[in-house]
Amino acid sequence: MLHAIKNNKTSLYKRYQLLSKGDSEESKAYDEERKKCQEDEITSTVFGPLDFVPASVAYGFWRKLLECVGKSVVLPLENPNKIEMTFWGRIFPRDRNISSIEPDLLVRMIFPNEKIFLLIVEMKWMAELNPKNQLQLQWRHGLELIDHDSALHLFIAPNISEGKVAIDDCGDVWDGRLVLIPWSIVRSLLEDLRKTESVLSRWAECVDVFLHKVGISSFTGFQGPKEAFKFSAKRCYQVEKKS
Amino acid sequence: MISEKEAESIAECFRYVDQVGLQINALLDDVGNLLPEMMSTLTKEFRCVGKTLISSRYCDSGWVYSDESRSVPIRRKRTGKLKADYYICFQVSTVGDGINFPNNSVPLLHVGCFKWPVSFKPGEEYYVGYPLEDEVSFDGGRLARWRDLEVNSDEWLFSLKLCSLKDIADLKKYVVEPSLKLLAGCEVAEALPDEWLGQVLLRQGKQY
């Protein structure tokens, strides 16, 4: 799918576009309908390929991503022997009265000294946290699998304010281990990665194009129309010359 | 009849507007993410309480967006209420009453602290449009203020020339930081210093 999107062979990505549609009821209903399935599809499209690469390569990506938000220090320096990625894996709380939880992604990293580090990843696109304490539940029951110092909780969203609200609401039960990452930061990292000789550079290129097409970008300032018109004039000249 | 080159320029203009629109969206998304991130370090009194609200409006002909906005709900920490006390609003206006005041003809970014989120929805309109309401006072010529001591309400607005902003560092320095300083009760002279580029004088003359 990533290759089809990159080479303009499909317009399926349009269903994920983060464009404001004004305030009409029609557009709101449309948005509600498409929110239902898009998050899982995006999670799979963007991060699925990391499941097929060597552990050291995938680890390099997660380390760099956490570096971007100043949190890489909590990860071990050495590469893990193995990384297990579980998409939508269910965690069954010890308390049987509480229903299971399903983070979008669990990244279980197993190191040579048999130490295990866990990333609990929740991704949002347009939908809101559901239930409102979704992140608190994920962390509380995620810690039944592993101790606090060997886990990080990542919240990746176009707008991270919901994550900040979650921290403020419960007095930061994460103790600094809930990492809020805007999608624009993911894209900035991919822009850098695609310029490297890394095994992931081709993947980074495809995902970068995908995120660009669906409306994820960082502010880089405005340019005057002159540049565009200069390009246009040059092209017109070339066309005329040929004819 | 227009020439082939002139016709091409129409397509170029639309492509250009599209590019500017993408930058406007990126700018608003970035300030929406920077505000909660920087809030805890610049003001201890307020916190975010919900999802950022989006509202936008087309120009009168319905062909292009004229205004796009984000409103971040906040409230005082000490209150036990669940609803927002205020909204920190960021409204970009490129054409129309959002930029139409004397001596201005460029796109603007309005940064305001209001009791309601910006809305362009017909019948529920609440946005920055000129002329401003009569009850407004001006602080330092650059901060429009609506104060009602009886109900302990303090709403304000400052505006920047949109194209004076170049990157995320500018968004932090000229947009998010001053809005949080004003929220924390800083004086206008400190939050919005004289020498800053891109400041829009809403009224001539200083009144510090």
Image (spheres, coloured by chain):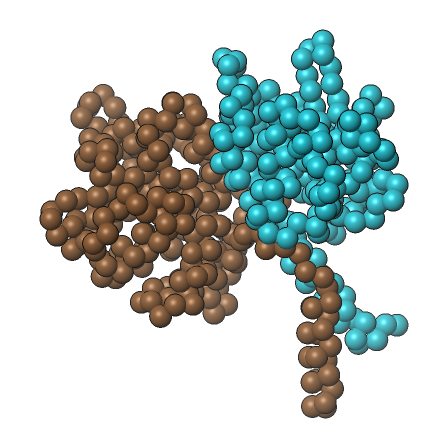
Specify whether B75 is left or right of B115.
left
**Outermost residue, top side:** B150
- Relative vertical location of residue A21 with respect to residue B16 in this rendering, above or below: above
User: In percent of the image, x 35 and y 54: which residue is there?
Assistant: A64
Q: Looking at this view, is A28 or B14 the one in front?
A: B14
Q: Position of residue A242 (x, y in %)?
A: 69, 90
User: In percent of the image, x 51 and y 61: which residue is there?
Assistant: A11
Q: Position of residue A135 (x, y in %)?
A: 36, 32
Does residue A182 show up?
yes
Q: Position of residue A2 (x, y in %)?
A: 41, 63
Q: Quadrant of residue B22?
A: bottom right
Q: Quadrant of residue B7?
A: bottom right
Q: Looking at this view, is B147 or B70 the one in front?
A: B147
State the brown chain.
Answer: A
How many callouts does the rendering have? 0
Q: Quadrant of residue B133?
A: top right
Does residue A105 show up?
no
Specify whether B41 is left or right of A57.
right
User: In percent of the image, x 43 and y 34: which residue is there?
Assistant: A163
Q: Position of residue A87 (x, y in %)?
A: 28, 47
Q: Colour of chain B?
A: cyan
Q: Looking at this view, is A49 or B169 the one in front?
A: B169
Quadrant in which the C terminus of chain A is drawn: bottom right
User: In percent of the image, x 20 and y 33: which residue is there?
Assistant: A147
Quadrant in which the N terminus of chain A is drawn: bottom left
- Relative vertical location of residue B127 with respect to residue A41 in this rendering, above or below: above
**Outermost residue, left side:** A113
Specify whether B173 is left or right of A99.
right
